[in-house]
Image (cartoon, helix red, strand yellow):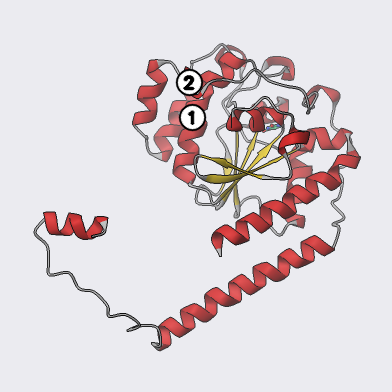
Amino acid sequence: MNRSRFIQQAMGLGPIWESREGWFTDHPAEITRHALIQASHDKAMAELHHLETAAPAIPEPAAQASAASLPSQQDSQLPVLPATALPDAEVDALDHLPDWEQLEQNVANCERCTLCRTRTQTVFGRGNPQARWMLIGEAPGEHEDRQGEPFVGKAGQLLDNMLAAAGLDRDRDVYIANVLKCRPPGNRNPVPEEILACQGYLQQQIQHVQPVLIVALGRFAVQTLLQSEQTIGKLRGQVHQYQGIPLIATYHPAYLLRNLPDKAKAWQDMVLAKKTYVQQAG
Ligand code: URA
């Protein structure tokens, strides 16, 4: 007996109405629905074929990113935070999933680490909270701290261009968040205590969005989500899982601005992401 039937029976509801095997398969509405699903699948496959065969001309943002806003050493390692290392208060907080507005408010009021003293404002995320793709970066930089939105600087422009080349609209098709919600001063690397203090918020965002696919941008996001010390070079090119959600690891757009040859690899990662998405959603 399936779960909903069990609950209905336990509530004294019944008798349960059930369709007979094959009853609906030749109903006109069902035929139309099936045709629509097939057409959307065919379109996605055609797009994918186009992406795989045509190397995109992803426009560069107007100028190079300033050195200060670039993530350093994409291939170096971060200390791994054990999943069980959450302090009790954080674990309790995760037991209770606040609604989206409350979660945003909790982030805005957060004082869990010292970054609250130096931030201009928190950066919660942007895009469509019902999107099927979720992109996760590192932390707000100077522009993001000032504007309160992720990826608004040069790296963000490159990211937008890459998404557009992959047929994705950054406001409609994706939700974009960061591991840290506050800017580390001087754009220094996040430290483990900050990642630990902030990770509950990201987990709750993921629980809300329930993406079909996660794309982790840069080593902080990749190593944090995968609890791994391996380099992006090793982790990219395969489909990982984050709590049952397929995760693609790729380079951070700010890193790509300085390492143009790796843009081809980042494009391969986008193609893998799209292929994985089509398989999951189809
Ligand atoms: N880099 C990130 O990882 N996130 C941002 O929001 C901006 C730059």
Measured in 3D between alpha carbons, the distance from the residue under mark 2 to the one under mark 1, in whole angstroms, is 10 Å
Instruction: Give residue 41's position: percent from left, percent from top.
Output: 60, 71
Name the outermost residue toward the left. Answer: 12
Q: Quadrant of the C terminus?
A: bottom right
Q: Circle 1: is it few (<14), some (14-19), or many (20+) Cα within 10 Å?
A: many
- Mark 2 — residue? 110
Q: Is residue 124 above or below residue 31?
A: above
* Dot placed on the residue nearer the N-terminal end, 2 or 1: 2
Count of numbered circles in the view: 2
Residue behind mark 1: 201
Tell me the kind of residue under disc 2: Cys
**Viewer-nearest residue: 42 or 159:** 42
* Residue 228 spot, x, y in % from top left: 63, 27
Q: Find ligand 1 in the image and state its quadrant.
A: top right
In this view of the protein, can residue 138 be seen by the observer?
no
Q: Nearer the viewer, residue 248 or 171?
A: 248
Kind of residue at disc 1: Tyr
